[in-house]
Image (cartoon, helix red, strand yellow):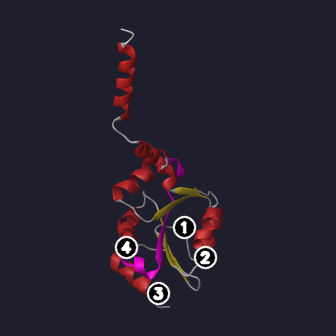
Amino acid sequence: MSKKFPFFILFAMLLSCKGESPKTVDQKQTNSEIVQTLNYQELKPLLEKQDGKNYVVNFWATWCAPCVKELPYFEALASKYSDKNIEVLLVSLDFPKQKDTRLLPFMKKKNIKSKVVLLDDMNEDVWIKAISEEWSGALPATLFYNANNRKFYEQSFTEEELHKELENFLNL
């Protein structure tokens, strides 16, 4: 019996692996790192780049129905304008404690390809006004910017409106 016991343990260990390669296991372990959690001071440099690119920054949350509705438009925008030096950043205002249970599964389900960061900063009186004096804090909200111009929108967009506003911004 003692000769069969180690084999049984090895067999049980192999079954528990479910055929996953080490790469798959590593991907699961780093899944939370796909979305960085930032405070406002860490986010601020992402809102002030002066590198010759045009940025579209959307502030959203999984619990915001208009935000969820327009997310595919930002994904389409990133794809359509990929050759025009446009970078899309999605800033999630979801609850940080729900990052693994809500935000990451949502992103996977919706096949979000754009860069997503999670803003975790309780001092919203400071960062909301720092992002835009016009912003009441309502979602969704979007910021277009480059080294020379900034344009802020506290509204949701249709796909056509989003593309039109970006074209107008690029032609400033």
- Percent across and percent down for residue 45 are 62, 69
- Percent across and percent down for residue 165 are 42, 83
Amino acid type of the residue that numbered disc 4 sits on in the rendered structure: Ser
Label 2 Cα neighbours within 10 Å, binned few <14 / some 14-19 / many ≥20: few
- Percent across and percent down for residue 5 are 38, 14
CA–CA distance between discs 1 and 2? 10 Å
Amino acid type of the residue that numbered disc 2 sits on in the rendered structure: Glu
Residue 91 falls inside the magenta stretch: yes
Question: In this picture, is 86 found above or below 111?
Answer: below
Q: Name the residue under label 2.
A: 133
Q: Name the residue under label 1.
A: 137
Q: Mark 3 points at which residue?
A: 170
Amino acid type of the residue that numbered disc 3 sits on in the rendered structure: Leu
Question: In this picture, is 118 found above or below 144?
Answer: above
Q: Which of marks 2 and 3 is in front?
A: 3
Task: Determine which quarter of the picture holds residue 69.
Answer: bottom left
The residue under the point 34% across, 29% down is: 15
